[in-house]
Amino acid sequence: MYFVGLMSGTSADGIDAALVSFDADNNPSVRTTLHTAYPPDLLADLIALSEARADDYPKIDELNERLGELFAESVIRLMQRSETGPEQVTAIGSHGHTVRHAPNAPEPFSLQIGDASIIANRTGITTVADFRSADIAVGGQGAPLVPAFHQSVFGSTDQNRAIINIGGIANITYLPAGNASPVLGFDTGPGNTLLDHWIKQHLHLDYDDDGGWASQGNFSDSLLQALLADPYFAHAPPKSTGKEYFNLTWLGEIANTVSDTFAPVDVQATLARLTARSIAQALETWLPDTEEIYLCGGGLKNRHLVSLLETQCAPVPIEDTSMLGIDPDWVEAAAFAWLAKQALEGKPGNLPSVTGARHAVALGKVFPAE
């Protein structure tokens, strides 16, 4: 059975598309992959929208359609690359692109854009989207949603494992050995998002290649401690967050409370420490029995960040998910292919122990192909 997973994460670097097959035991195999970078003008609009203080509904509607077309184009190119016809694919699972995530608002919601009707129409493939709202409707955070997939494919009978995804926001899935206790998972805080936006502001680069700029700076302990004092880090799971919370406005407001002055490169060094320390602190506080760590997501390409994380988490060994059978770049796209399969089969896609939902539910809305 073939499914396509589409993922646009909080780093907003583009669309990951993966063609995934499943065997009779529901084990996934990533067959073909394709990354589509966002055009500069679209990327600028997405960043501006995610950081806006007030909702810009006309812009949301416009970008919803533009992203739908780009998602569909990504699938068509993926199918051409894999020499697969639409009749061979059961469904597409599209995460969409998150522009608002407010699970703790008086009226909780999470908004992803990328019109699924357009995707289904252009590709001729049934599309499943809007995965978060069903979990929120039963009292959950609507995130993270990937831990159920992690449990299905990465669990161990004899080791307590943590799967750490470092995207724009970093999150942890805790997989107890032999499912002896419930799976846990939550967002730890910023992953790459502050690093990316800070270097964009000062060096006009999209990201800090291998953490080269951060490695040249001297981190400020006073700034680091001020950032870590934010209540989010001490808040017990379940919890989730996004760029509407952890952004340069947040950074500036806290930096202004510290009497020291900082060179831009030293702030970058401090932000790298913040990501590593907040992840390690979450493990120490909430998941002290972790015996193995496996990384995935774009942050894995930042060798300076990974080195900091290895130091912070020692002596727990750190590998990446390729050791467990899935390339770390494609775990999340594969997860949304799996979630689409779960949806069509009427099976739950959330884990109440992770999101805080009152009970497990099937996730996603189905948009049939014409």
Image (cartoon, rainbow, N blue to C red):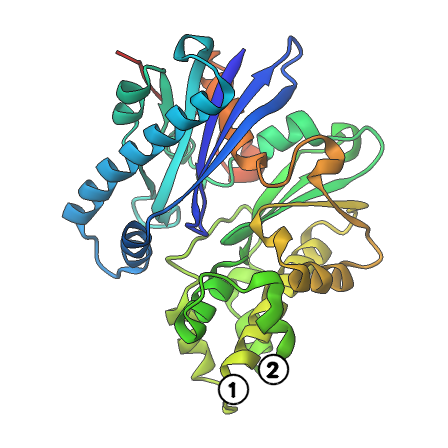
Res. 234 image quadrant: bottom right
Badge 1: how crowded within 10 Å, few (<14), some, or many (20+)? Answer: some
Q: Which of 260 and 12 is in front in this view?
A: 12
Position of 331 relative to 194 (above/below): above
Residue 335: x, y in percent? 54, 30
CA–CA distance in space, label 2 to label 1? 8 Å
Labels 2 & 1 near each other (Cβ < 8 A): yes
Q: Which of 243 and 233 is in front in this view?
A: 243
The residue at the point 77 percent across, 64 percent down is: 311
Q: Helix, strand, or loop for circle 1?
A: loop
Q: Residue 262 carries which label?
A: 1
Could you tell whether 18 is left or right of 160 in the image? left
Residue 229: x, y in percent? 55, 72
Residue 140 seen from this side: no
The residue at the point 51 percent across, 86 percent down is: 262
Residue 182: x, y in percent? 67, 33
Q: What residue type is labelled 1?
A: Phe
Give the residue pinned by disc 2: 220
Q: Which of marks 2 and 1 is nearer the N terminus?
A: 2
Position of 270 relative to 303 (above/below): below
The residue at the point 41 percent across, 57 percent down is: 243
Q: What residue type is labelled 2?
A: Ser
Q: Which of 4 and 248 is in front in this view?
A: 4
Q: Residue 243 carries which label?
A: none
Residue 127: x, y in percent? 36, 20
Residue 218 seen from this side: yes
Q: Give the position of the C terminus as an image quadrant.
A: top left
Res. 78 image quadrant: top left
Image label count: 2
Q: Give the position of the N terminus as an image quadrant.
A: top right
